[in-house]
Image (cartoon, rainbow, N blue to C red):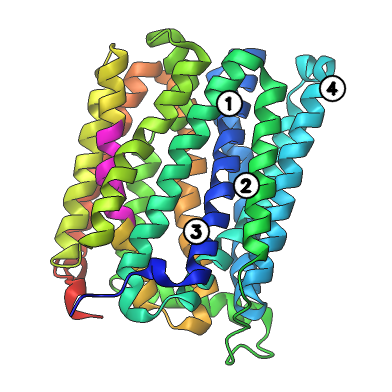
Amino acid sequence: MQTPDVLRIPDFRRFMAGRFFIIVSIQMVSVIVGWQVYELTRDPLALGMIGLAEALAFFSVALFGGHYADTHDRQRTMTATSAVLTLCAGTLLWLSWRCGATLQRTTLPVYGVIALMGVVRAYLAPATMALSAQIVPRELYARMAAYNSLTFQVGAVGGPAVAGLIYGFWGVKAAYAAALAMGIAGSAAAAAIGSYGVPRRNGGEPIMTSLASGVRFVFGNPVVLPAMSLDMFAVLFGGATAMLPMVADVILHVGPQGLGFLRAAPAVGAGLMALTLAHRPPLHNAGRKLLWVVAGFGAGMMVFALSRNFWLSLAALALSGAVDNISVVIRQTIVQLYTPDEMRGRVAAVNGVFIGSSNEIGAFESGVAAKLLGLVPSLVFNSGMTFITAGIVAGASPALRRLDLSKTR
C-alpha cells in the first residue's frame, strides 16, 4: 500500500507556504544586513557580531518560547511572531532610508533590530515545529521533516540570491522592501491555517517546572541528546556563512551578486537532497548515516576553505548543503518520534538552543577565528574540527550508532 502524501493535507500546504515566505524574508534580511554592515565597517569581527547579537537575544528567551508553545495556541503564535518579524524588516528599511548618516557612524541600530529578531524567532521556532506535528499524522513524520526541510532550503535558495541581486542592482532600500513584502505574504498564509488548540495535559504547571521538564527530557534521552549535540558542535565549527561577505570580496572578487549565489549554494544542494528524501526518507540505519553525513559536511567545507575558484566554491557549498540536509531530516525525525505532543514546544526550544549555538555562536566564532588566524586558516581549522566532532560522538554514543528509525514508527 502506498504511503499517503503530506501534501494532501490542506493545512500543511498553508503551513509550508507561510513558513516559506517567512524564511525567504529572514534569509533576505540576513544577506542584506551582512553586506550592509561589511560595507560600513570592512571588519570581519563586525560580521561575527551580527550572529552574536541574534544568538544572545535568542538564548535569553528560548526556553520560555518553548513553554509558551506548549501552553498557547501554536497557530496564533506562528501568525503573531511572523508579523513581528515582518515589522523588523520594515524597521531596517526605515533605518536605511531615513538614518543613513547615523549608520555611517554606528551600526548599533541594526544590531538592535537583529537582536529583536532573535527574541521573536525564539517563540516562532518551537511553535512552528510543534504545530507541524499537530497537523500531520505520526506515520508521516519522516516525510513531513523532509518537506519542511525542502521548504526551508527552497526559501534559503531564493532569499539570498534575490537579496544579493536586488542589493547589487537597485540598492539596500529596494532589497529591504522586497524582504518586507515576503514577510507580509508569510504572515497572511500563517493566519489562514486552522487552530489545533493547546495540548490538554498542559494546564497550570509552574513555569520553572515546565522549563526544567523539557531540559530533563532532552538530557535524559540517549538518542535525542547526542543527535542534537552532533549538530551543534559540527555546525558550530563547520559553518562559514558569516564569513561569506569577506570571501566574496577578498578571495573570489564577486561582489554582492556573487555573495547571494554563495549564500544560496548550500540550499540548492540541500533542496535537491530534501526532494529525494521526501520520497525515500533515510530511516534505515539512521544513526550511522547521521555520523557519516556530518563527516561529509566537514569535507565539503574543507574544499570550500581551500578553493580560489568561484564555481568550485559553489559546488563545495552545494555538496555541504546536500549532506547536511540528510542530517537535518534524520535529526528532526528523531525529535518528532521520541517527543510526546505535550512537550514538543519545550523540546523544540532546547533543540533551537542547540541549533542557535551552531549557527549564531558559530558566526561569532568564525569572526573571531578569522580575526586571529586569518580568513583561510580559520576556515581550514573549523572544517577539521567537524571531523573530530563526528568521531567523538560516534565513540561516545553507541545508542546513536545503532539507531534504526524504520523500527520506531
Amino acid type shown at disc 4: Cys
User: SS at mark 3?
Assistant: helix
Q: Is residue 403 above or below residue 157?
A: below
Q: Quadrant of residue 14?
A: bottom right
Identify the residue at horizontal 35%, vertical 72% (top origin).
Answer: 141
Label 4 Cα neighbours within 10 Å, binned few <14 / some 14-19 / many ≥20: few
Cβ–Cβ under 8 Å for marks 3 and 1: no
Q: CA distance from mark 4 to mark 3?
A: 35 Å
Residue 88 in the image: state x and y as whole percent.
73, 42
Q: CA distance from mark 2 to mark 1?
A: 18 Å
**Circle 1 sits on which residue?**
34
Q: Is residue 359 above or below residue 302?
A: below
Labels 3 and 2: the sequence-earlier one: 3
Labels 4 and 3: the sequence-earlier one: 3
**Image check: 148 left or right of 273?**
right
Q: Nearer the viewer, mark 2 or mark 1?
A: 1
Q: In front here: 300 or 266? A: 266
Q: Nearer the viewer, mark 4 or mark 3?
A: 3
User: SS at mark 2?
Assistant: helix
Residue 378 in the image: state x and y as whole percent.
36, 24
Main secondary structure found in the magenta portion: helix
Q: In front here: 220 or 158? A: 158
**Circle 2 sits on which residue?**
56
Q: CA distance from mark 4 to mark 2?
A: 25 Å
Q: CA distance from mark 4 to mark 1?
A: 18 Å
Which residue sits furthest right? 98
Q: In front here: 167 or 237? A: 167
State which region is magenta.
318-328
**Circle 4 sits on which residue?**
99
Q: CA distance from mark 3 to mark 2?
A: 28 Å
